[in-house]
Image (spheres, helix red, strand yellow):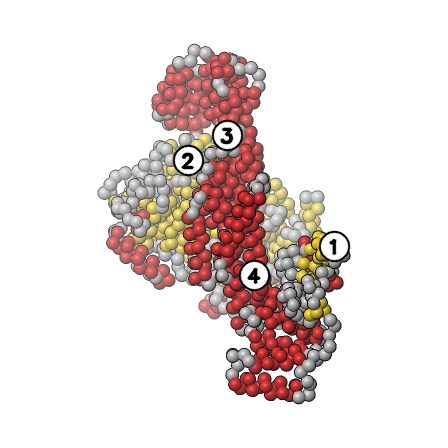
Amino acid sequence: MFAYLSKKIAIPHKIKLHSVSWNTDQGWIACGGEKGLLKVLKLDSKASGGSNLSMNQTLDGHKGAVCVITWNSVQEKLTTSDEEGLIIVWMLSDGKWFEEMINNRNKSVVRDMKWTANGQKICIVYEDGAVIVGSVDGNRLWGKDLDLQLSNVEWSPDARHILFATTDSEVYLYDSQGNRISKVSLIAGQTAGHSPLVGMDWYPGRKLQGKNSLQIPSLAVGFRNGKIQIMKEVGDMSPVLIDTGMETTTSMKWDTNGIVLAISGSKEFKGSNGEQKKQQMIQFYSPFGKHLRTLKIPGSSIAAITWERDSLRLAIAMESYIYFANIRPDYKWGYFNNTLVYSFKKPDRTEHCVSFWDPKTKERHIKYVRKLVTIDAGGQHCVFCTKTDDSFDQYILILCNAIGSPADSKYITVQPLFTAMTSQHVIIASESMVYVWQYRTATSRLTSINGASNKSGSDRELLWFIDQAPSIKASKQYLDQNEYDSSNAKYPVTNDPICCLCASTDTLMVGRQSGIVMRFSLPHVQMIDRYNVKCRPNYIHLNCNSTKLSVIEINGFLTIFDINQEGDDTAVALPVHRKDCWNFMWSSDNPDLFACMEKSRMYVFRKNHPEEPVASSSYLCEFKDLCITAVQLDDIMNEPETYLLDYPDDCVINFETKSLRDTTELLASTPMSEAYSFIEDNPHPRLWKLLAECALEKLNFSVADKAFVRCRDYQGIQFVKRLKMMTNKKQQKAEVEAYFHRFAEAERLYVEMDKKELAIALRMRLGDWFRVVQLVNHGSVNEMTKAWDNDAMITKAWNNIGDYYADRQKWDKAKRYFMRAKNFEKVAECAYVVDDYKTLKELLSVVPEGTPWLKKLGEKFQGVGLCTEAVTAYTRLGDPKAAIDCCVLLNQWDLGVKLAEEHKFVQIQGLLSKYATHLLQKNQIFEAIELYQKAGKFTESARLLAGLGKQALKNKVHYLRAKQLYVLAALDVEKYKERKFNSKNTVGKDSRQTAAMTLQSLMEADRDIGSDSNLEDPWHGALGLHLYLLAQRQLYTGQHSNAMHTALQLVRYEDVLDPKDIYSLIALASFSNRFFGQCSRAFIRLESLDSFTEEDREKYKDLAMSIFVKNPPKDPPTRDTACPICASPCNPWDQQCPHCNASIPVCIVSGRAIFTQNHFTCGRCHFNIYERLVRRFVNCPLCHANLQDGVRKQSSSGRSSTSRMKMAP
């Protein structure tokens, strides 16, 4: 930052001031002094200069010296107190201040008064220890007499606590009701001895510090001897301690942002004659104790200081004057490639908000950066230096383009105290180390720092100790050491620290505190020379050809040095000396032109001679073509989020140099020959360019040709040459209008000449395709235009309009115009971006077969999993292999196998088998089953499902799961049969051909099924498990008769179930149903099983003996049943007729045998259900198919008939 005195206001009658306070909201300044002096002043707005007084009112009421002044900005009230203890509250009415309330305790003197941040309470402390807390309406809230001699008071930001300071340099913490909490530990007070306190200031807001504001010290306590303590909170155990070096401190004050602490005081020094003198000064510190600037003030004693609202000015009360000091903050900002980049903090975020703003297009891009240290810019990029999140001293250099997109990055361990950037290099320096990084650009591969090419990237960076010559070997050691141990990066220390640096495309300058400036070459870093500027440089800048160096020393003195003479240790100072300079910039195209900011004026120098100054406080961005670009950073930073949007045209200001202004006036008011002579005396490419443009306006081609030659504009020379060849003056005028981008006027002239084709060609060059369409479709055209293919031109226009919208990601509009141009390929691209697959599907029927971009369309469908559409696209392209590969990739094997059979691609079978084998080896059986099902290999999937069913039966636990697997296997076999027997088209075939085709299908089915019992009778296992589970459920629900009948059906399923389980269930169900004959036969079968041991067999015999001793092995009588085929008598549980051997069906709901024709048959599994039971179900209990698709069988006059069953769901 930089500070300088800008204005002084004298108090009438030389009355000495004691206090001053600036209202931070409305801008009033109140100052109080001896003899009851109290004035309220107000400066003009900054827009009108901010130096004249718009208000100067003297307030009468005090008799003694006014010592304490405090503002209530929220309520627009002023509170003052004098040395006699009189307190007056002033209010504003009709633009004037009047007394509102008066209070005089008449016992002691008021030492301090403070309002809360919300303006609702005021605390008044008296020297004798009395404390009064009142409200804004004048009511006393509470009052206490503390046994302390008070000197200062301060509210906490939330108004919940009060700090009281005593004359013994002690500080006590109280709550808002006056109850003492604790004594504040003052480490600075221990080192200060018995030095009294001069003030406390607790910053109340967090305007710019952001979400991490609690980590920033904000409570400052100052002592008379120059010791300052800054704390984050009252109980901070590690406060920031500052020794200002001043013998006497008078006051201190935070700025309105809480990031700069101003401390006023004096320091003794010896004069030229050896006498002791006191220098009044203000020192500026950051919240962490870093010294920012010292401002020396002429006078004998500073009474008080106060900040303006935006912290850009400081009012200083000294003797009978009010001095105003302007503050120029060091913002984090840069300007490059017509882009302004700056950072600020948001209250709700911990990161820095970095804004990229283009003044021409008014476009803004926001980027959030953590722990931002500094910003620099150069060429086409800017660089952010940020600190890593860990506790190590490691930093990241992030290179960004004009919209904030990262282009390159680099980790470093050098503390970035000073930075510089060129179009190819970023230079970082600490106090002892210099780091040069050649970032990636289009030409960075052609040149490197060490002149060699290294794939590791070490040829693009160099690190060296400032007291040693740059060395590749030493740099590699530093870089390698820190790459492996960045947490312990140690560098040598120099006795002459670096204090500034700058760079041009071929030169690097490093300034040191001793006044030595070292010169290095770029990109091959070598030390060339060193100069002694005999001062401590604070900022240094090189001109465009590296022949002159500007130096702004620590106190703001500007000196220009000629460094073109090699070997001279002392730089030659040119006769340019300015004071209070805080910003500087060389012209990028003239080594003798530069601009500097001196206080609130901008000076432009040409060959060491200044032009008339311009009033400005802007920051210089660019000096090119005799035009200076500056940015109003103060206004932007005051409202960083809204100012660019509200005042986009006021942010960046362009200043013209005097020669440019004079040339413009000469061209407007004098003959061109005089302007030509003036430019010859003051040559510059911009002036010659201006002359050439003026000559073109007047169609003076000879002067325009000479001017273009002088400014080396080859395109301009060629343009003039082309104009000379034209014979039509109106056409020449139209071309000139187009040259100056006045295209509407040029088009009008072309149309008047009946040269519409030239107007169309102009609009086509401009890319204004909307206007091209209008010109082509509007009115008649001449013969030359008729020769053109208007349809082709309009098609081209539609295509370019579509490209225009596509570039701006307006895909729907782009798609519409591409459709007009029948550019189906671009239509597909736009539809794909917005996921408009409906349009993509429609294109399949529109695009002719064999169109090459159908491949891309198929890839788009394939990428989103639309297999059918992708196959259609590949098929229309004539690439069946790609279609098959798509099916394989998307796991649509059924469609893939079908395509392979149609196009005779036998390789798919091998691929299918290989993939299935791979899945089985990885034990992904269900994935293999799904693969076979999708490929239509239902027999293979059925085998795997049946195998899983058998595995599930091994532990005799997952019977239901086993049944489900057997059902799925049976369903796959049914699908196989349905496909096999229905795939043969028998329409139009005679009976012999139909029989042959049926025989062929049977032979193919026999080959595929083979001798696998699970495939020959697929429902066998499923029905067995179904009946087994049904018998268990019937037994446990007390349906003993049904359970016995169902269990007796299990005899035929010994190949599925364990015989032990079957006959044990039969024995149990028969015993429960009192059918001891059946029970006895079950025990006999159990005792004959080979799987039993002798011990098991004995247990079964003993159990049978205990049952049949009491119950004879006979069955009770049953109702007679007859075979439905031969009408012979049968047992109710018989599975086939003992006379005709006809199979008797079983009901899958009750488990009983069906001896009647009135039953229902499931349409999928073909098993039967009693007619009286079927209406209780919607789905088949076995296969879960919808029973509406089943068939009812019933007898009519002794004959059976079938009818389709219709049921309500």
Q: Nearer the viewer, residue 850 or 680?
A: 850
Q: Amino acid at mark 1?
A: Ala
Cα separation between marks 1 and 4: 30 Å
Are the residues flagged by discs 4 and 3 in contact, CB closer than 8 Å? no
Quadrant containing the C terminus in the rendered view: bottom right
Residue 672 falls in which quadrant of the image?
A: top left
Q: Nearer the viewer, residue 338 or 875?
A: 875
Give the mark nearer the N terminus: 1 vs 4. Answer: 4
Density class for disc 2 (Cα within 10 Å; few <14, some 14-19, many ≥20) is many
Q: Residue at x 48, y 66 (%)?
A: 238
Q: Residue at x 60, y 57 (%)?
A: 68
Q: Residue at x 65, y 56 (%)?
A: 1163
Q: Amino acid at mark 3?
A: Asn
Report the mark closest to the observer, 1 or 3.
1
Residue at the disc numbered 3: 800
Residue at the disc numbered 1: 1208
Q: Is 893 placed left or right of 1081 in the picture?
A: left
Give the mark nearer the N terminus: 3 vs 2. Answer: 2
Residue at the disc numbered 4: 1018
